[in-house]
Image: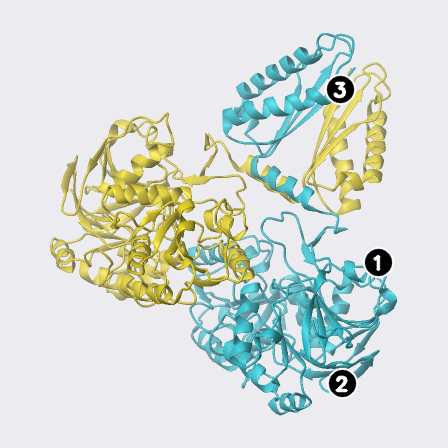
Chain colours: A yellow, B cyan
Amino acid sequence: MQKAKQPYLRIIPLGGLGEVGRNMMLLEYKRAILIIDVGLRMPEEDMPGIDYIIPNINYLKGRSKDVLGVVFTHGHYDHIGAVPYLIEKIGNPPIFASRLTKGIILRRQEEFPLQPKLEIEEVKDGSKIQLGPFKIEFFKQNHNIPDNLGLFIETPVGNILHTSDFKFDPHPIYDRPTDFRKLNDLARRRILLLMSDSTGAENEGHSFSEKTIMENLEEIFKQAKGRIIAATFASLINRIQQIITLSEKYKRKVVLEGYSMKNYVELAKTLGYLKMEKNTLIKAKEARNFPDSRITILCTGAQGEGSAALMKIANKEHKYIRLRRDDSVILSSSVIPGNERTVQIVKDEILRQKAKVFHYKMMDIHAGGHGQQEELLEMLKIMRPKCFLPIHGQISMLVAHNELAKAAGLSEKNVLLIENGQIIRLFANGISVEKKRAAHYYVMVDGLGIGDIGEVVLRDRQMLAKDGMFVIVAVVDRQTGKVKSSPDIISRGFVYLRESKQLLAETRKKVIAIVNKAAGKGGAVNWAYIKDEIRNKIGQFLYKKTQRRPIILPVVIEV
Amino acid sequence: MQKAKQPYLRIIPLGGLGEVGRNMMLLEYKRAILIIDVGLRMPEEDMPGIDYIIPNINYLKGRSKDVLGVVFTHGHYDHIGAVPYLIEKIGNPPIFASRLTKGIILRRQEEFPLQPKLEIEEVKDGSKIQLGPFKIEFFKQNHNIPDNLGLFIETPVGNILHTSDFKFDPHPIYDRPTDFRKLNDLARRRILLLMSDSTGAENEGHSFSEKTIMENLEEIFKQAKGRIIAATFASLINRIQQIITLSEKYKRKVVLEGYSMKNYVELAKTLGYLKMEKNTLIKAKEARNFPDSRITILCTGAQGEGSAALMKIANKEHKYIRLRRDDSVILSSSVIPGNERTVQIVKDEILRQKAKVFHYKMMDIHAGGHGQQEELLEMLKIMRPKCFLPIHGQISMLVAHNELAKAAGLSEKNVLLIENGQIIRLFANGISVEKKRAAHYYVMVDGLGIGDIGEVVLRDRQMLAKDGMFVIVAVVDRQTGKVKSSPDIISRGFVYLRESKQLLAETRKKVIAIVNKAAGKGGAVNWAYIKDEIRNKIGQFLYKKTQRRPIILPVVIEV
């Protein structure tokens, strides 16, 4: 490239580019590193047992002293959730976050008692901080959680604007609409690079206003005869506010159900981000003192999660709450790809019990928090950046966002399609991509293990899930080389053993024959060979009989 | 109910009511049984290793002599796919199917060489057959596979109309539009019970015409510079016809990729259901003799299935075909719920390689084969049945369909919400539901096993998948009751063993301590107790260390 000796800034996305979730990004100038967000993401279906996927921070190994600090855009787990797993490893640097974001980070940290104390400085709309070569100005952006901040970053090569997750909402609830004058002021200071949220880039038009949603929700409140059971994400503070406000208007008490719902509401209320009257919230037990028409149940489980409150209610496993014919159940969140089946299952179970179901496909009772094509294009047109990097999204979303950037007049060479681990060089007059790529393989969290589950363990889990396992324990007489008594067989997930006695008897016979043939002559015995023989021949035999391939584990014990 | 002594007909759905797939239904009058369809369904996510779910035919046990025959509506696997697993068990009765349906059934049967020869009588639009007390008239219905037949069934209690899967298409491709005069003629003979396809009952409006889709597909053909790679279901014969016709119009040769695609196309072509010129189809190897702009690749894998042709192409694993920048990839099928993630993965991989992607969310390049609310309402209004049973669908679809029936003026008491195994009594003047329910639990196919995988094996598979397994083999001296040498540990899917040496060493120590404490005094030893101790204590120990719960399998060998 032309820019060999010019100064440049490195940008290294460690998560969130090519996927939805685990957002984390580094800005590096000379040795100094600024981190934006430290999020997590849910595992894929082919990762059984995995709790979360977190960013790969190999690039930061041994670099703790270079880390100036972490700035957080907002309090959703895909932006803050990996803090307890990673913050110590990057040297527990200073953190900068808005009031609500700080509260959520600290609350989550309480679940990890061995973690170090965090040093968090509160910032807000208009705050400015200087961290080494970076001057960061925070500005308010609308999303579906309050206290969401975009970042305007002055760097030695030019200005960067990071939108955070955002949408333009002309009529947000209990919040100011987007401050376009402020955005235009920022734009006037010239944006070298715009990094903008791509989650909604495949969706045409404009996202729904929260006002429209409020009106539709109110329609349900007007007509409901029995209880209203509203399920949503605990972190969708704006939606929760709407449900509470409507409940008050229609003289309903609100019962909270689900650990995270109680947790978030309490926190947001304490910090002043949820407004409600003193007596609105009641305990589940107290609900019986009110007629059904005076009760709203606000709960988790809109994705059909097996352990969440709504599924327990639908499955009649909830301690206090059973569905009734006049109940109106609202599923007020969009379905996360991959969860369609579980949502269908919970919907069907509710309908089976004759309650009513309202979901986002039927009415506009949920708006994503992400701007759609019109809004993204508008952001591009306001900022008129020289360079553009779509962030937060699957490849298909990044590609769609880049099409918008080109439509807004950006030069193709300044529009990047970048994935996790790729390293961008930002110059005062353009961008390039390094050939070297930072480590970007998945780091999986499973229980207390962080990154200890690799491809091998995962593949074993998949194989175990598919056809189970089959352990054969043969005790062999060291003197004669012959099998003593009948080999033990232990199997799980393969066949129902009680109904497979003949299969097991034939297998034992074959094992004895294999061992006796190979070892029964006495003398030096190659046990590794015998184990391989058992694995292969018994594997073939079982496949022929069942067309299944359990993992076969031979144990040979010499006595 | 009032109808105690009146004659009645039993209707027993064995699959397809409360789910999408494995459609099968019995009509029983006195002892005589007529079967409609014998389909299969794909397993849920929490059923690892399972190939299919098939109808539970326990109700038919020992009743082979009562089965008059099986009539098939059309050739999709959710209507015919369980034939090889079940037909022998119900006494290999006479089969009645249209020409294409028959061809597909026979072709599939070839994959099961031990199956008996089937006795299939061909029927078509207008055919009439008498089976015991049932007179069946077949009438043509539009769907997305040719040769789809609805059923008009005269029974001793009244007439039943079974719609099969259907949509009303005013402009189908290479097919006649719905014959409304015929439908009205049937209606005039009075319909006691309408059983109608509910798959589209939650979707507003009217399904797209195949003509609209053809126009949108043509737009892609007009603009494509390189190859067109069109992925769809092999059984979507109508869509395949459109792609072939457009390829001929735009002077493209067609390469077929994927086993089932080749299979279906050959069959449909042989039977005259696919029209094409002699030289349109070429082999993959010959494609290199043509410029990219003269090539269409028609393949399987529109759902992102890992083993299908499109995924192989996207993953650079295909023998001949690699993606190129000018390729246009068409995903022409709706996404089956649960497959959203795999479709996203294949889409991203294609875009990563700079090819273009067209999918149904972007353009109307796929129409479901199922009528939506307007069509379903129209069917209800034409037939004006006394009673209504929504079939083929999840509960939420059946409920939505029932709302349409009520809107069409049916009395609430004659509109049924029924699930698999429930038994309906149809009287000349109404319906009731028996209290007794026929067996309806899942019958799962896994390899050669049909119904041998039950809850226990499935739960073991889920547990194995989540945290793996941990086998401990302790050899104990019969004389002293003490452990001889170090216990063997075999583990899969739990931790990466090579990096867990300390954990294993500690575990061995604990096992030795448990055994020696319980058995080391000599005398009578309770081995079951010792195994329980190992399971519990080692389980707790491993959980404390890892927060994972592998299945623990202790083996104690006395020597």
Residue A434 falls in which quadrant of the image? top left
Which of discs 1 and 3 lies nearer the camera? The answer is: 3
In-front residue for pair A411/A65: A65
Q: Residues within 10 Å of mark 2 (few under 14, many from 20)?
A: few
Farthest-out residue, front:
A289
Chain designation of label 1: B
Residue A271 % position (x, y): 23, 42
Give the Cα separation between the discs numbered 3 and 2.
70 Å
Which label's residue is closer to the chain start, 3 or 2?
2
Residue B557: give its label: 3
Chain designation of label 2: B
Question: Residue at (52%, 25%) from the top-left corner?
Answer: B499
| Secondary structure state at the residue bearing disc 2 | loop
| Secondary structure state at the residue bearing disc 3 | strand
Q: Is residue A454 left or right of residue B143?
A: left
In-front residue for pair B336/A458: B336
The kind of residue tagged 2 is Ser
Chain designation of label 3: B
For disc 2, the marked residue is: B127
